Amino acid sequence: MAGKRLRWAAWHLLAAGGAFLMVYPVIWLFMSSFKKSELIFVTAGSLIPDPWIWDNYATGWKGIGGLHFGIFIRNSLVLVVLATIGAVLSSALVAFGFARLKFKGNKFWFAVMMLTLMLPFEVTLVPQYILFSQLGWLNSIKPIVVPAYFGAPFFIFLMIQFIRSIPAELDEAATIDGCGKFRLFWRIIVPLIMPAMATASIFSFYWRWEDLLGPLLYLNRPSMYPVSMALKMYLDAETISNWGAMFAMSVVSLIPVLVVFFLFQRQIVEGISTTGLKG
Amino acid sequence: MSMRFAAWRSQLTGYAFISPFLLGFLIFTAFPVAASFYLSFTDYDLFSAPSWVGLEQYQTMFSGDPKFWRSLKVTFIYVFVGVPLRLTFALMVALLLNRASRAIGLYRTVFYLPSIIGGSVAVSIMWRNLYGDDGVINLALNLVGFESVRWFADPLAALWMLITLSVWQFGSSMLIFLAGLKNIPPSLYEAASVDGANPPQRFFRITMPLLTPVILFNTIMQTIAAFMTFIPAYIISKGEGGPLDGTLLYSLYLFRRAFVFYDMGYASAMAWILLMIVALLTALVFATSKYWVFYETKED
Amino acid sequence: MRRVWMLLLTALLTLALAACGGGSKGGNDGGSGGGGTQSSGGGNAGGASGSSSGSSDSGSKDPEPVTLRMAWWGSQPRHDYTLQVIEMYQQKYPHVKIEPEYASFDDYWKKLAPQAAANDLPDIIQMDISYLSQYGGKGQLEELTPYLGTIINIDHISENAISGGKLGDQLYGFNIGVNTIQFQYDPELIKKLGVDKPDDNWTWDDYYALAGKAKEAGLYFDSGLRPEVFFGYYLRTKGQHLYSPDGTSLGYDDDQLFIDFFAPLAKLAQDGDTPTPDVKAQVKGLEDDFLVKGQQVGIWQWTNQYVGLQQVANRPLEMAHMPGPNREQGLYLKPSMYFSISKNSKHKEEAAKFIDFWVNDIEANKLIKGDRGVPVNSQVIEAVKPTLDPALIKVFDYVAWAQQNSSPMDPPDPNGAAEIIALFKEVTEAMDFGRLSPEDAAKRFREEASAILARNK
């Protein structure tokens, strides 16, 4: 009896302890954003700011180079939304093709697609850059957004798994009723795979939100910088006058990701789980 | 409607649906990969046309560029220390959390959180400051009686920063392990208990073997992902890979050669070497997998 | 049949979506093609006047609107006043709109090169001596000689100042400010080392001795010397140069020079008289700078950095000359930076007009305040000086003194200079950490630098 209680307590201690350690860095960042800049590193050991100030957020929001932080957030949103719409829709289309349509080469191209998941980005980085340079797309969001409209293998795979769980009888019934493939896709399958599309959207959201390499290469004007580049600009600035401001903006940049995560965590978790198991 | 026509039509339909992927693959993957191969035999600085130099880039890489070897070494350490550590923690915590309890959801969220935000610039900046001379990590070390470490003074210490950042993000692997664990029918455990198996035995004889497919999957994906790590190295070392190339991960060095020094031919050669290394490793893991991965034959 | 067309339509739609999926959000998207809208008729080829607010030249016909893209690097204060000067210019010439692009020094070059490759450089480009060869030599920059005296008034600008932007005979960058190197220090802190100031004619040995006392006094003496700049100076005092005249190899043969210069510096770092690289890497910005915090005696840097430093340090600083022997042979006036015009610009004359305004307009220079170096126009110097803070006046005077106590500068850095600077950083870091002996460093530097420069052959 007591043993079980003890084990329960020990387990919770271990789990809670581990959890605290995991989250501590984030808590530290959050708390530090409310400390006075000069005190942040001096009082690194104590989590509670003393005095507690809100100024860092105001200062940080003013931004850099006359661009207030809202601009960077707007830029990030534009990138993320455009890319996500493209990625999710095109992936659904392709997933339907692979999962439901019989055609010669289905298995072959599916295998090719899975292989691309394992291709290191370094191999395509330079030629893609050159390609975009020849197209005149440098210094614009096109290189970042346009490729998203060609399907993202990870999402395609996710959705294929999902579509497979939809009984084929449904397809047959619809076809008998005179549904063409596209109608079948749009009217029947898509509504049914909404959860997978939602999951894909969430992943797309925070991957794109955090992306630095694309913006680093293709966005050259500070007014076009997304949040990730803006933070890097804070770090680079030869005269960082305010570490508190930078921490505050770091927190701000993480908030959308955290919000999305907390709201949709179940879907995220399910999403990862289904890809992990080749069902 | 003739059979041939119907068949032709379904071909077309199929390809129509996957055309976005096909096109994208050709334009953004296949062509670049081929172009990259070609460029690796040239000298190209983006200004003027590429000029053919044969194997010179590869020669320089192997015999005239100590930085290349340092970068490779650093990356290998990062991958072969980081990935096992990451997977170990993932498995351990997954085992810990694999029980029906209402608190599980909360814990799972907390452990998974770093995975979500870990790839961001904000976190890299924060990590850099955690490891500062006057940072929290050193404070913690002091608390338990160790001396502060100058993390930015020593290449290996600096690399350790990157490794710990990667390990901190074990949450995604943990979720996959959790899913794998859930897939193990409890009846197996019950049967084993009835037969008198104790927990360690149950773990090694039931859990581990049945998890091996998931372990395989995780190992491959995490290894490849590790070779692609860029943002932490870039932000923590402020783009330079220091100190003394201690954080010069392969992707960062490639980036520098391509976009700081505009040495695109060399960078392409580097990319292909990486591709071969990754392909080799993956093939190796797959080849040896039949010795340790247990595929349960499902009857359904 | 209809269904097949539906599918094809879908595919096409997807493609169409992709093609116009980009859109130009986030401000002006000048990605393709130059930044100009309609081209003006070359503006007024008479040049702006050489003094303040000259009469506007717009005659009976209004000039067509022109958009110029202008790029520069710097920090926040520089961005601020530059934007103000641009505003001033736009007020004066309403038909001109200038689109600014600015970044930190490192990012700046990363952005410029792809623009060059796409023939899409900004009209007005801030240029640095270490990149002039690269961009000028590859035909990316407009040759400026035809604009001298016509659009760009050079009545009060010395030939010396202008020639600093030449590669051979071609003028690729217009000097917009003059700099020289010096030691800037805190007079109060240096007293803790037992002297009131460094001797006017101090030598390197004097410096090592003085700096060696810093640790005991609980201070750093300086934060190191940028190798490419100060080793270059040192070589000049010994009658050598860092680069050979044709830029295909190093300009000195004796590695002992390398050892003589860097070994004592490495020792200072290892002894704790100057900060080690990891400590420097963690300096969290100018306010965290050791000198600013009163923990470091001085800093070796360019004259145009003096004012900013003093402002942040919030206390009076002093200047000391470079150490000798042979200071006069080593010292030089360097164009701190140039403005160049891109070869692909569609509004070269308008761009030149802006450059003329920048270097000659007195009101503008009252805003610029020598942040990019002491003005090259002697009249501007005279007119602006009285309005300046004492600190800035000191800078101007120092440069004037240097003009009399220096020798002609070396030709612009050859192609590959950026890589050599990175190489310098690597070996000095290793030396400062004590992981590489100066002897080995000298050899390694020679090997790798020679390989880099040999590509210019």
Image: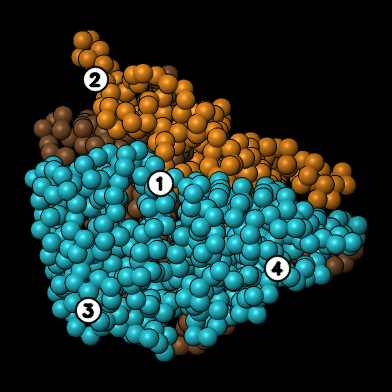
Chain colours: A orange, B brown, C cyan
Give left or right: position of A170 versus C432.
right
Amino acid of disc 3: Lys
Give left or right: position of B134 versus A274.
left
Residue ID for mark 1: C390
Residue ID for mark 3: C238
Residue ID for mark 4: C47
Report the Cα–Cα distance between label 1 and label 4. 33 Å
Amino acid of disc 4: Gly
Tell if the residue under mark 3 belongs to the same chain as the one under mark 2.
no
Tell if the residue under mark 1 belongs to the same chain as the one under mark 4.
yes
Query: What residue appears at the point 10 percent right and 32 percent down from the top-left corner?
Result: B145
Give left or right: position of B149 versus C34.
left
Does residue C342 appear in the picture of this structure?
yes
Q: Nearer the viewer, mark 1 or mark 4?
A: 1
Residue ID for mark 2: A10
Quarter where residue B102 is shown: top left
Whichever of labels 1 and 4 marks the residue nearer the N terminus, that label is 4
Query: What residue appears at the point 64 percent right and 70 percent down from the top-left corner?
Result: C152
Quarter where residue A241 is shown: top left
Query: What residue appears at the point 32 percent right and 67 percent down from the top-left corner?
Result: C229
In the picture, which quadrant includes the N terminus of chain A? top left
